[in-house]
Amino acid sequence: MYNSGKIIPGIIIFLAIVTFPFWSNAGKTNVKPEPKIDTPAIQQMPEGERKCIESKEFMKAGHMQMLNDWRDSVIRGGDRVFVSSTGKHYNMSLQNECLRCHSNKKDFCDKCHKYLAVKPYCWDCHIEPKENKS
Amino acid sequence: MSMDRRDFLKIAGITGLLGAGTAALSGRMPGALEAASTSPNSNALKAKQWAMVIDMRKFKTPDDYKKVIHACHSIHNIPDFGNPKDEIKWIWTDTFEHTFVGQEHEHISEAVKEKPFVLLCNHCEKPACVRVCPTKATFKRKDGIVMMDYHRCIGCRFCMAACPFGARSFNYRDPRPFIKDNNLKYPTRMKGVVEKCTFCVERLDEGLMPACVEACKDTKALVFGDLGDPASEVRKVLRENFTIRRKPELGTSPSVYYIVGGGENAG
């Protein structure tokens, strides 16, 4: 083989760089994000009623879809009241309803969003609660 | 492997059915919201076409203007760039000559000529801005309000070119650092979207009058109501006074009416 002295080390270096993310993270355990729900507003709720507007499982998987539906419903339809599957009424507002309880954006929203590297642009316009302003 | 047409169609049909079946199954959300629904607020004010009458006779001192503008701009998080090029305005003032183009003449009373007129989005019945918006970010609500959906706005500024009243402002810069006192109940805007007066939809939907109307409710300088209801206050004021609109010849049919008044109270 011609130039094997350059080609073989070249291939080795190339493979080393390409596989860098795999072997540099091998053996490390990723810490699962644990969003915190210990805000004052949630603490004040009586023990049995400490629930989000829908089930935890649904909110985990579907909150983004729900927020999209909410914004269309509020802005384009003028409907501002959400009737949950348990029949309770809520004001459809990220800033005034979701964040009233979840006033810890950093420890709640950002925890998972950072872990999953998603960057929702909610906060370009919606104002996050004051106590957590960075 | 050879296959005749009959077998091919059979396999194609089964594959199609399987695909459709799995798509239908996987499209379901975990714990989908079967019972959930939405509804308007029970206090919400309803109308066929919201409209406003601006009684210029009742604007006498600079304070009368200031309190109306401040009421709006403070609750809607309007930035102050201190620079007319970047200015964001929902409600503002201009001269008679600029407000009622073509209506001015050289013998007009000095008081009217000098007087600032209150301007805001006209919430036209046939809005030019809505016709040109390529993303339907600006649209007309059922109650006649010309509304902005900032989520959809791509910042093309066609609406600003189309609006004959200059009612729209573009965020050339990030407005956040220029907002003095944030109203934490209301969002701000971001760089790259167009904004304007919304007749305070967020207040109407909760049963409140627009902020500017409430700010001058002692003088009733701004009268707000439903144009489609003959018993409404705007209709009463329109019956009893001579009113004009801005640039009616353009056919957009503005919903903001002006009582200009003579020189007696002006200035």
Image (cartoon, grey):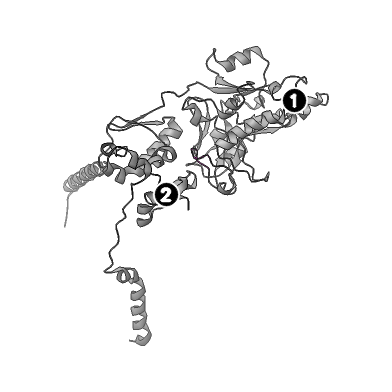
- The residue nearer to you, when weighing B46 against B245, is B46
Residue drawn at (50%, 29%), measured in percent from left and top? B203
Q: Is residue A77 left or right of residue B28?
A: right
In the picture shown, does residue B138 fall above or below B112?
Answer: below
Identify the image quadrant of residue B246: top right
Q: Position of residue B231 (x, y in %)?
A: 54, 12
Q: Please report the bounds of the magenta region as a residue range.
A: B183-189
Q: Chain of mark 1?
A: B
**Quick check: marks 2 and 1 in contact, CB under 8 Å?**
no
Q: Which residue is mark 2?
A: A120
Q: Is residue A92 left or right of residue B80?
A: left
Q: Is residue B156 left or right of residue A36?
A: right
Q: Quadrant of the N terminus of chain A?
A: bottom left
Where residue B103 is drawn, which disc sits there? 1
- The residue nearer to you, when weighing A8 against A54, is A54
User: At label 2, which amino acid type do we have?
Assistant: Pro
Label 2 to label 1: alpha-carbon separation: 50 Å
